[in-house]
Image: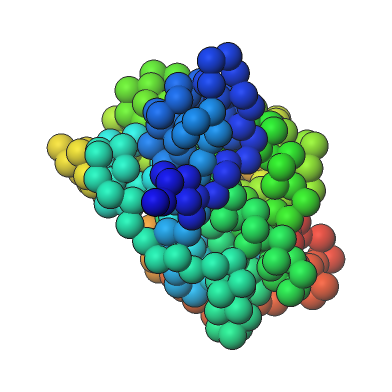
Amino acid sequence: MTSAKENLKEAVLAEPDQDKKIRCKLCAHRCVIDDGKLGRCCVRKNIDGVLYSLNYDKVCSANPDPIEKKPLFHFQPGTRSFSIAAMGCNFQCDFCQNWQISQAAIEGGQIDGQPISPQQIVSAAVRGGCKSIAYTYTEPTIFMELCSDCGRLAKEKGLANVFVSNGFMTREAIDFARDWLDGINVDLKAFSEDYYKRLCKARLQPVLDTISYIANQTNIWLEITTLLVPAENDSDQELKKLADFIVSKAGPDVPWHISRFHPQYKYLDSVPTPLETLERAEQIGKAAGLHYVYLGNVPGTKSESTFCYKCGRMLIERVGYHIAANHLKDSCCPDCGERIAGFEL
Ligand code: SF4
């Protein structure tokens, strides 16, 4: 006879509570889960007083992507990142681009995926000439056990590891990952609690805490992305708050990716972000003191390239996710010698 626990991976950062309850410390929801029940993400289950990951051996996406697609523009530019995901999320964003894999478990569907081992993932990354492994497409926090096993092995083979995350992780989760995690792009979706609550069923403050902690207390390379949703988070006032927060709490060298929205999933009654809105946000970011502000989902603009913030020299020319030219010399501007912040530039 097989038990419900067979083939399941025991969850990390789980703490026993009273009466066989378990407190999960991976993300800021900090669920207290009754015996036999699921956490809010629906991919972690308490079975007999032990918490298990339900998506450890269920890889639902595995592709070599340009690192620029994450987006990470100051991290091993021009290289490929083997990108994997498992189903699930701790957010429920109305406009999620990957809702088929992120929301299936929450909506009561199956957790699909292939049992691809960390060894197989790392081997595929090495064979494919990738320089890193990206945990992306869904929220890596909720498949932390796979990230961790894979990440440690990847480091042994000389590969870097990056997260593309909503930033709702706990400090304990960051500390758990910091030995093998080299880079992260955190989605800072807006600067209002109302936005996070109404559109994502989450909270802003833990995301701000994550950004400050990573920037100031770890060596993890940080970039930030904000999707501009028309009439939701694109006022001058809110954009200024976002930019001021990044400058003051993370620093002017943290790249800010301002990304164009397209109607998705449950959020269809809108228009794509106008180019003028993106350009206005770019100006606000630069005026606030940010050194690197990029526009995303608008291929063909010069705002996807890297310029020296000191002398204005074009340093890395991008066309979409393709690097057309990289003029950096030992991570410095070849004209004025200014050092450009990043990881293995
Ligand atoms: S990862 Fe977050 S949502 Fe999932 S069980 Fe843990 S605390 Fe709850």
x, y (%) of residue 22?
Answer: 55, 25
- In the rendered view, does 136 fall on the left or right side of 214? left
x, y (%) of residue 44?
Answer: 46, 38
Most foreground residue, 194 or 294? 194
Q: Quadrant of residue 175?
A: top right
Figure check: 114 above or below 44: below
Most foreground residue, 139 or 319? 139
Q: What's the colour scheme?
A: rainbow
The C terminus appears in which quarter of the rendering? bottom right
Q: Residue at x 59, y 66 (%)?
A: 118
Figure check: 44 above or below 292: above
User: Which residue reaches farthest front?
Assistant: 1
Most foreground residue, 289 or 79? 79
- In the rendered view, does 98 fall on the left or right side of 287? left
Q: Residue at x 28, y 46 (%)?
A: 104
x, y (%) of residue 308?
Answer: 70, 60
Figure check: 341 above or below 284: below
- In the rendered view, does 167 fall on the left or right side of 218? left
Q: Quadrant of residue 156?
A: bottom right
Figure check: 93 above or below 76: above
Most foreground residue, 115 or 248? 115
Q: Residue at x 57, y 24 (%)?
A: 23
Residue 69, can we see it? no
User: Which residue reaches farthest left?
Assistant: 269
Residue 48, can we see it? yes
The mark total stands at: 0
Q: Quadrant of residue 336?
A: bottom right
x, y (%) of residue 226?
Answer: 47, 42
